[in-house]
Image (tube, helix red, strand yellow):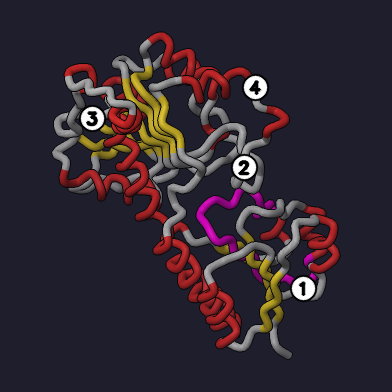
Amino acid sequence: MKKQILFIDTTHPYLSDALSAQGFICSHYTGTSRAEILEMLPPFDGLIIRSKIKLNREALDRAVKAKFIARVGAGMENIDHVYAKSKGIVCLNAPEGNRDAVGEHALGMLLALLNHLCRVNAEVRQGIWIREGNRGTEIGGKTLAIIGYGNTGYAFAEKLSGFKANVIAFDKYKTGFGSSLVKEVQMEEIFREADVLSLHVPLTEETRQLINANFLNKFQKPLYLINTARGQCLDTSALMDAIDTGKILGAALDVLEYEKLSFENLDAETLPEPFKRLIASEKVILSPHIAGWTHESNYKMARILADKIQELYRLDG
């Protein structure tokens, strides 16, 4: 009997085409009703998701035939992967597919910050021509610190390799990754030396609100902050206080603390005062969670997941 796969979110058509060619029956759900999704789950052998639904115990108990869940992305925080594993469900993701996109976006945000590109673009369009007040800062010679040296942390270090910067990184769960691209360090050195901090960690209970007032106060120099990881890893109120005191010289955020689960809009009913401070600041650059959202990464993630699913069944067979 052919295996059935439910696509709960949209993906690049390559994934559905490749799986169909491998003999799977692919069904696509285009609605947004959680109740409808839960009702649909029992007959499917595999689920393809992005961020439309949280697959908690309730959902996983409905997925009685599921062998795998594949997330078209890197983060897995919307899946109770511990419970899934206990039920024999393999959780797959595709961080290899969007790491270059995230690395390039983080670099672009850094360049925009250091050279005031968003501000000067607006000024020139208004006929304002300020050169001295918009003098930029070069990356060369600066210490750029990376927290989290997985796929995107590595990709960011790789993109920085031609800028003659001192790139250092800390990863609590990885050692021995020092190379010509990056020096492996402890957090003490990051707090002491960083001119720029870029965050590349998943959202877990350990990393939630990791960047808070106490954390920021440990840095010995004013610095720039980039977050292309997850919005809830950073306390927005603490960030804005640090900007007001000059501890943070500027911030570039692709992700916001106040995003809904889908990551495709803001939770407008709960936007607090720190968010109003954030959007009013000229020292902050924002983008709508698109760091990993390129035409190329859309295809690459689909291809990678197709290969992983095929390998999963090959090993099982």
Q: Is disc 4 placed on a helix, strand or loop?
A: loop
- Which residue appears farthest toward the front when viewing the image? 127
Residue 272 — which label? Answer: 4
123 displayed left or right of 308: left
C-alpha distance separating marks 1 and 4: 42 Å
Residue located at (65% from left, 41% from top): 260
C-alpha distance separating marks 2 and 1: 32 Å
Q: Nearer the viewer, mark 3 or mark 2?
A: 2
Amino acid marked by disc 4: Pro
Label 3 Cα neighbours within 10 Å, binned few <14 / some 14-19 / many ≥20: some
Question: Which residues fall within the magenta stretch?
Answer: 63-82
Amino acid marked by disc 3: Thr
Q: Considering depth in this image, is 316 or 235 the residue closer to the camera?
A: 235
Of mark 3 and mark 2, the one earlier in the sequence is: 3
Q: Nearer the viewer, mark 4 or mark 3?
A: 4
Answer with the quarter of the image where residue 33 lies.
Answer: bottom right
Answer with the quarter of the image where residue 128 lies.
Answer: top left
Q: Is disc 3 placed on a helix, strand or loop?
A: strand
Residue 143 — which label? Answer: 3
Q: Which residue is mark 2?
A: 265
Q: Is residue 67 magenta?
A: yes
14 displayed left or right of 151: right
The answer to whether the residues at label 4 and label 3 have Cβ atoms under 8 Å apart is no
Q: Does residue 172 appear in the picture of this structure?
A: no
Of mark 4 and mark 3, the one earlier in the sequence is: 3
Residue 136 — which label? Answer: none
Q: Position of residue 25 (x, y in %)?
A: 68, 83
C-alpha distance separating marks 3 and 1: 50 Å
**Which of the image's four quarters has the N terminus?**
bottom right
C-alpha distance separating marks 3 and 2: 34 Å
